[in-house]
Image (spheres, coloured by chain):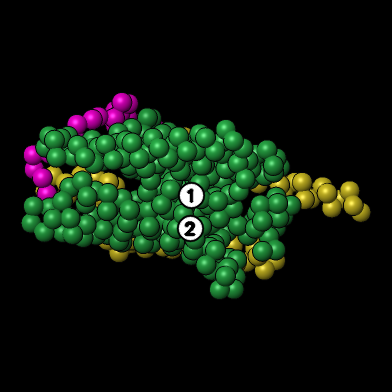
Amino acid sequence: MTKNAKIVIALLFLVVVIAVTPLLLIHDSEFGGADGAAEEIITAINPNYVAWADPILEPPGGETESLLFCLQAGLGASVFGFGFGYLVARKKYKKKDDN
Amino acid sequence: MTRTKTERRIFTLGVILSFVFGTATISNAMHIMEGYLPLNYCIIWGAICIPFLVAGFFSIKKTISKHRKTLLILVMVGAYAFVLSALKIPSVTGSSSHPTGTGLGAILFGPSAMAIIGIIVLLFQAILLAHGGLTTLGANTFSMAIAGPFVSYAVYKICRKMNVSKSVGVFFAACLGDLFTYCVTAVQLAMAHPSEVGGFTASLIEFLGIFAITQIPLAIIEGLVAVVVMLGLESYAKPELTELGYMGV
C-alpha cells in the first residue's frame, strides 16, 4: 500500500469516528436539523413572527424528502466518480503507451 | 485579471445594481411593517450577491476558455459540493447539519467561481427539497457560496505563505470556510431577529450556539474529506492542477 493510500484510509476512518461519536454519546435526541432549531429560537424571540413565504414544492413527508436528498447525493457522487474514473484510467493507460 | 470591455461594463452594472437595491432598502427600513422586516434583508443580501455572481460568471467563463481541460475538474468540484451539502450529519449538540463543500473549489478555481456553483446547489435544494428557500436565496448564497469560499481561499493562501504543507492548508481552508459559513448564517439571523432583551448580541449568541457549535465537528469532517479528494486529484489530475496553478506553487 502506498503512503497516500494509508493516509486516505486513516482520514476516512477519522471522518466516520467524528460522525458516529455524537450518536453514541447522545441518546435523548432525534438529531433534527439545525435549521429547525433556529426556527424555534425565532419563535421564542418574536412570538408574533409569521413566516411570510412557503417553499413552492414541499415534499409530503420524510420519505419523499430523503428520496430527493438521496438523488442529490447520488447525482453528485456519480458525476464525481465518473470524473475520477476517467482521470485514473487516463493515468493508467498513458503509462502503458509509454512503455 | 484582464477583462474585455463588455465584461467590465456588465460587472460595473452589477456593482451599481447592488448599491441601488442595497441602499434603497436600507433607507426604507423604517417604513417596512413588522412582519415584513425579513423581506428587507432578503433583498439586501440578494443585492450584495450580485457583483460576486457576475464576477463568478466571468471567472468560470475565463477558466473554460483558457484552460479548457480543467472543465472536468470544475464539474467534479461542483458535484462534490452537491454531494456534501446533501449529507446531514449528526453533531455533538444533538442537531444535524450538513457541510458546504465549497472550500475545495475555492482553492482550485478561486472564490468567485464558487458563487455560481453554490447558487446552483442552493437553487436545487430550495426548489425541490424545501431546504433553504427562494426568498432566503440571497442570504444563503452570501454565506455558503461567497463568504465561506472567500475565507477558504484566504486561509489557503495564508497557509501557503507560511510554508505550511498543501494538505494541511487544504484542511484548514475547507474546515474554516465551512465554519465561517454558519457563523455568517447566525449573524444574518441575529440581524433580522434581534432579541427584545439584549438585542442583536443576545440573538447572535443564541444562533451561534446552534449553528456554529453544531458545525464544528462537521467542519473538521469537511476539512478531512477535502484533503482526501485533493490527494486523489494530486496523483491523478496533475496536468489540470498544474494548469490551475495548484501544483508547484
Q: For numbered disc 2, what is the local secondary structure?
A: helix
What main secondary structure does the magenta stretch of the protein show?
A: loop
x and y percentages locating residue B150 in the rendered image: 46, 54
- Which shade of the palette goes to chain B? green
At numbered mark 1, what does the secondary structure look like: helix, strand or loop? loop
Residue at the (37%, 42%) spot, across then down: B48
Q: Which mark is on residue A55?
A: none
Vertical placement of residue B172 versus B200, above or below: below
Q: Which residue is mark 2?
A: B152
Q: CA distance from mark 1 to mark 2?
A: 8 Å
Is-magenta flag for residue B221? Answer: no
Going by the picture, which residue comes out furthest to the top? Answer: A56
- Check contact, mark 1 vs mark 2: CB within 8 A: yes
Residue B34 seen in this snapshot: yes
Q: Tell me the yellow chain.
A: A
| Residue A75 in view (yes/no) | no
Which sits in the foreground, A91 or B68? B68
Name the image quarter holding the N terminus of chain A.
bottom right
- Residue under the image location 63 percent in, 43 percent down: B63
Q: Quick one: quadrant of the C terminus of chain A?
A: bottom right
Q: Which residue is mark 1?
A: B102
